[in-house]
């Protein structure tokens, strides 16, 4: 992302102002120090006038593309939620079995 911004001769302050965020906030996005939503990455792609896929590609300096990292984090959240749902399903199944044993 930084490489593209520099190629476009834009300053962090310019991009941050358009995004309506602080310069340190934008710097964290650019350096993958914070999770970025897909919507935010699309906004940045629009500012740079590039396809979002360009920002998805792995950045050799950070070893992760911004969007790829955001998607991996979202997937991990969904995996955690699925684990919770599986546990709840097992508990409900066991409760149902106990009720069936009691009812003649």
Image (cartoon, rainbow, N blue to C red):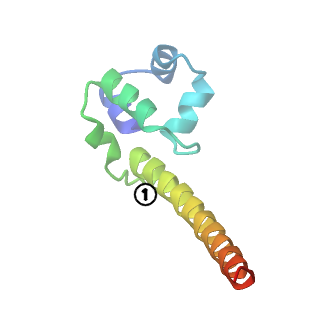
Residue at 46% of width from left, 15% of height from top?
A: 18
Which residue occupies the foreground of this view, 19 or 89? 89
Q: Is residue 90 above or below residue 64?
A: below
Report helix, strand or loop for mark 1.
Answer: loop
Image quadrant for the N terminus?
top left
- Please identify the quarter of the rendering in which residue 42 is found: top left
Q: Is residue 34 above or below residue 91?
A: above
Q: Which residue is mark 1?
A: 63
Residue occupying the far right of the picture: 102
Residue at 58% of width from left, 42% of height from top?
A: 34
Image quadrant for the C terminus?
bottom right
Label 1 neighbour load within 10 Å: few <14, some 14-19, many 20+: few
Residue at 75% of width from left, 82% of height from top?
A: 102
Q: Position of residue 8 (x, y in %)?
A: 30, 24
Q: Position of residue 82 (x, y in %)?
A: 54, 63
Which residue occupies the foreground of this view, 94 or 88? 94
Q: Is residue 93 left or right of residue 67?
A: right
Residue occupying the far front of the picture: 104
Q: Is residue 73 above or below residue 25?
A: below
Which residue occupies the foreground of this view, 45 or 74? 74
Query: How many numbered circles does the render carry?
Result: 1
Q: Position of residue 43 (x, y in %)?
A: 39, 26
Q: Position of residue 7 (x, y in %)?
A: 30, 30
Q: Is residue 4 above or below residue 43?
A: below
- Please identify the quarter of the rendering in which residue 63 is found: bottom left
Which residue occupies the foreground of this view, 39 or 33? 39
């Amino acid at each position: 992302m930084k490489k593209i911004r520099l190629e476009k001769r834009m300053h962090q302050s310019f991009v941050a102002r358009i995004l309506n965020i602080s310069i340190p906030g934008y710097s964290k996005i650019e350096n993958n120090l914070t999770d970025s939503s897909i919507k935010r990455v699309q906004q940045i792609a629009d500012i740079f006038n590039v396809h979002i896929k360009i920002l998805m590609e792995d950045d050799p300096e950070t070893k992760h593309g911004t969007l790829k990292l955001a998607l991996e984090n979202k997937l991990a959240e969904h995996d955690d939620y699925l684990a919770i749902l599986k546990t709840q399903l097992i508990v409900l199944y066991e409760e149902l079995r106990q009720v069936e044993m009691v009812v003649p």
